[in-house]
Image: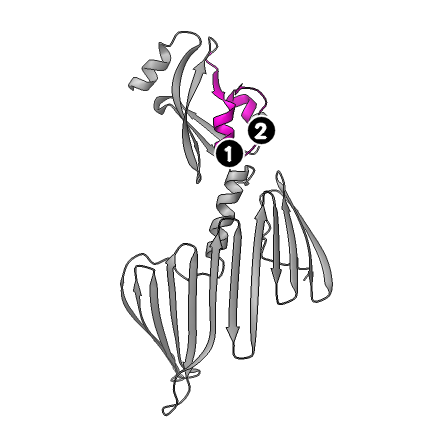
Amino acid sequence: MTAALLAILFLAPSDSLLVEVRLSGVGAVVVEAVLDADSTLHLPTGEVATLFGTSWTPAATFTLADLTTAFPLLLVHWIPRELQIVVDDPQGVLPASRRQREQAQRRAYGGPGATVTTSGPYVAFAADERERYVADVGYSWRGVLAVAARKSSTFGTTWNLGAAPSPHVFASVSGAHVGVHRAPQITNASARLAFGSTWLSASWTPTRWDIDALVTKGPVSVFASSRDVFVITIRGLGADLQVGRRAGVSAFHVSVGSFRSSPFVFPTTY
């Protein structure tokens, strides 16, 4: 039996102890809790509410029963041996959980295809009985810089250069080599920025420019695109509402339960 568990067993009624409250995927805070005569743990509301990113303040202190009553979709685990409370929020009920996931989504949306963290070259080759083949070669440096080229018997030679100097920035340039005596041509380029609640992307091809942007404030996300797309997503406790307009057509989308709507996607009806 650990020292922490022994301390709990021999605490006098209404004695205090330090407990770590951890919100999975977000962070943790150490608070001074009180264990009463009925072995009920009382936690300070203010510090925990700050971790959760919510203004929930039923009283100066709360119990784990109060927490599960207020947020029934949370999974709360009290681990006495470690003096730790672990809170899992799989449905994104708490603002801090939603903010963390949406930031990760904004960084990942349209970013590099693989989260490579080691450096090294790679070579790949595929062929079939019709004498068609594809050869790939490339190099990645710590996931920060990557260069790749592909030779296809059907589509010729293509190449890509991508850079992600920070979690907030990603840029890439792609092109093709269409003839022995012609210089490589750039076919498209894109860049993406993600800072806090704001996400911005721009892409270019020889025929057009496209700009996408997403701004989030609390449970509301607003997405707009130069491709004539506009979407508002409102996330609630276990339910999402989306309304949008694309190419002159308006639509809405409602979801209840574990399915979460992507703020980047226009509601589809097909």
- Nearest the viewer among 121 and 256 is 121
Q: Where is residue 119 drawn, in percent x and y? A: 27, 61
Residue 184 lies in what quarter of the image? bottom left
- As measured in the structure, the alpha-carbon distance from the residue carrying label 1 to the one carrying label 2 is 9 Å
Task: Tell how many labels.
Answer: 2
Question: Callout 2, which amino acid?
Answer: Trp
Q: Residue at x 34, y 58 (%)?
A: 116
Residues rendered magenta in the picture: 39-67
Residue 147 visible in this rendered orientation of the protein: yes
Q: Where is residue 137 drawn, in percent x and y? A: 31, 73
Position above or below: 177 against 204: below
Identify the secondary structure beneath mark 1: helix
Q: Which residue is mark 1?
A: 52
Residue 95 lies in what quarter of the image? top right
Q: Where is residue 140 drawn, in percent x and y? A: 31, 65
Residue 113 lies in what quarter of the image? bottom left
Identify the secondary structure beneath mark 2: loop
Question: Callout 1, which amino acid?
Answer: Phe
Q: Residue at x 52, y 29 (%)?
A: 49
Colour mapping: one colour
Q: Residue at x 35, y 75 (%)?
A: 149
> Is residue 105 within the magenta segment?
no
Report if the CB atoms under discs 1 and 2 are less than 8 Å apart.
Answer: yes
Q: Which residue is mark 2?
A: 56
Left/right of residue 129 with respect to residue 238 in the rendered view:
left
Q: Quadrant of the N terminus?
A: top left
Q: From this viewpoint, which residue is outermost toward the left?
A: 120
> Is residue 63 within the magenta segment?
yes
